[in-house]
Amino acid sequence: MSKRVRVRFAPSPTGGLHLGGVRTVLYNYLFAKKYGGDFLVRIEDTDQNRYVPGAEEYIFDTLKWCGLEPSESVQHGGAYGPYRQSERKESYRQYAEQLVKDGHAYYAFDTLEELEKMRQDFKTEQNPSPQYDHSIRMKMRNSLTLSADDTKRLLDEGVKHVIRIKISENETVSFTDMIRGEVSFDTSTVDDKVLLKADGMPTYHLAVVVDDYLMKISHAFRGEEWLPSAPVHILLWKYLFGLENMPHWAHFPLILGPNGKLSKRDGAKYGFPVFAMNWTDPKTGELTEGFKEKGFLPEAFINLLALLGWNDGTEQEIFTKEQLVEKFSMERVHSAGAKFDYEKAKWFNHEWIKRFEVSGLRLEVDELLEKNGLTISNKDYLDKVIWLVKDRCILLTDFVQQSSFFFKAPEALDIDAVKPKWNETKQLFFAELIRNYELSASWDAHTLENNFKEIAAVNDLKPGELMLPFRIMLVGGKFGPGVFDIAELLGKDETIRRIQKALTIL
Ligand code: GLU
């Protein structure tokens, strides 16, 4: 690669960052790291109507949580700032004016009423929502239809106006997409997009091209939803900076939910997260749960996102970030939509929890337990608990249920699971077990199990039938790791106390 690799994630701060957005970040990040390049974040906030307070901080918090931090941004600084488009406002007008001078754009003075009238007047059955394009522009009030003098007078008088790109009719615009190959568009279907708005702010189309140029972006990667805008961007590149300077493009496949494009509503409907982290809509106060709070590890989250649209050509599914950097290639990103499967997402998380060292989980689990009213003072004990239960936890939040009983005797016992088959013999068995355990010199799972089985054999009982009651006594329900491992960790006093208490209820 001859040019220095510089890629960007260019979000508009309009709300929570969903799966697709984080995947765009990830692929940009991996590509930059692979080629020793730069990854920057540019905040595209030119549409002030869609600006949502808090969304920008949320984006950076998310990238931090995912471990995908840029080297340049509003928060990280850099030589190509400002990295917030609203702060670059002044730099865009000259490019729009240049386009007008070169005949590729024009001033349009149409009022909202005139635009609405145009939509009504030119509406036909085949064309129910006419656009401001080559077929209409000569019927409107703009610098193409007005005389040069009239245009100058209106501009001098400060009459509200926009600058629109002049898209030619019947031109084919083509470019090579790194994922899709050659992509072509017929310009006849493209409208004369506004480049500079009446308030002097650029639209996204102008700003994205100007900033990619000024920030020396070598590769512009984004979601497939931007593909229809590509012809406008290619033409702007051609008119402003020459096609040879244009970045290489790639448009990532859509992420599909159960009903087509994955939406926030799908998440609510099917009970899975769509946003990376909790997002509270500041207008409605509505909270949308994120992957983080649901109990996903960031390592698992980026791993599953990487595989939503890419694979390395083998069966391997678990990748660390470093492995992804090494293996990732744009050529292996598919163009077809990638289906998001929540069960599979959980599988990734489970695999990652299993692979994690206890020390890597300690902080998180400690916090979770604390949030659930359990303050853990003995950290060695906590480590042992984590080690014992972690393979059973699919989500981090599962640690609460899987380990609470180690710190606090269960409040309610699932008596119904035991009661129907409970009898005097079993009662006597447990009374004897208490005596035996009280006298036992060693307290390890192996000894406890042997003693348990011996007493069962002497009383002609099947240990299998006694195991469930024993588990219910210690845990409260039908879950958890091996019951003798639990007893070992709980210790002699606590184990005996729990058996005794249960016997009074049964
Ligand atoms: N501002 C656009 C967005 O919100 C960025 C599209 C692009 O990367 O060109 O996704």
Image (tube, rainbow, N blue to C red):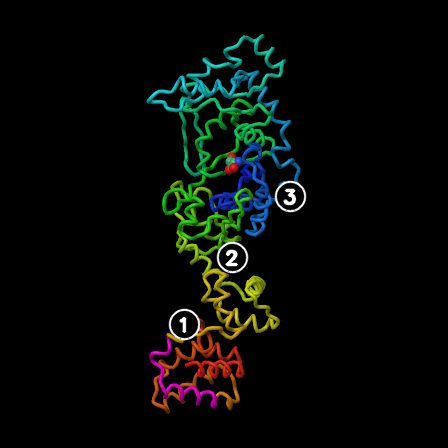
Quadrant in which the C terminus is drawn: bottom left
Q: Amino acid at mark 2?
A: Leu
SS majority, magenta = helix
Q: Earlier in the sequence, mark 2 or mark 3?
A: 3
Q: Which segment did they paint magenta?
A: 417-436
Q: Position of residue 334 (x, y in %)?
A: 40, 43
Q: Considering depth in this image, is 475 or 232 the residue closer to the camera?
A: 475
State whether residue 466 is above or below residue 210: below
Which element is circle 1 on?
loop
Q: Would you say the beta carbon of the disc 2 residue lies within 8 angstroms of ligand 1?
A: no
Q: Residues within 10 Å of mark 3 (few under 14, many from 20)?
A: few
Q: Amino acid at mark 3?
A: Gln
Residues under labels 2 and 1: Cα distance?
26 Å
Q: For residue 454, say whether it is visible.
A: no
Which element is circle 3 on?
loop
Q: Considering depth in this image, is 426 or 332 the residue closer to the camera?
A: 426
Residue visible at 39% across and 18% down? Answer: 122
Which residue position holds label 2? 297
Which residue position holds label 1? 478
Q: Earlier in the sequence, mark 2 or mark 1?
A: 2
Q: Position of residue 177 (x, y in %)?
A: 44, 35
- Place residue 180 in its image quadrant: top left
Q: Considering depth in this image, is 116 or 139 the residue closer to the camera?
A: 116
Residues under labels 2 and 3: Cα distance?
24 Å
Q: Position of residue 215 (x, y in %)?
A: 60, 34
Which residue position holds label 3? 75
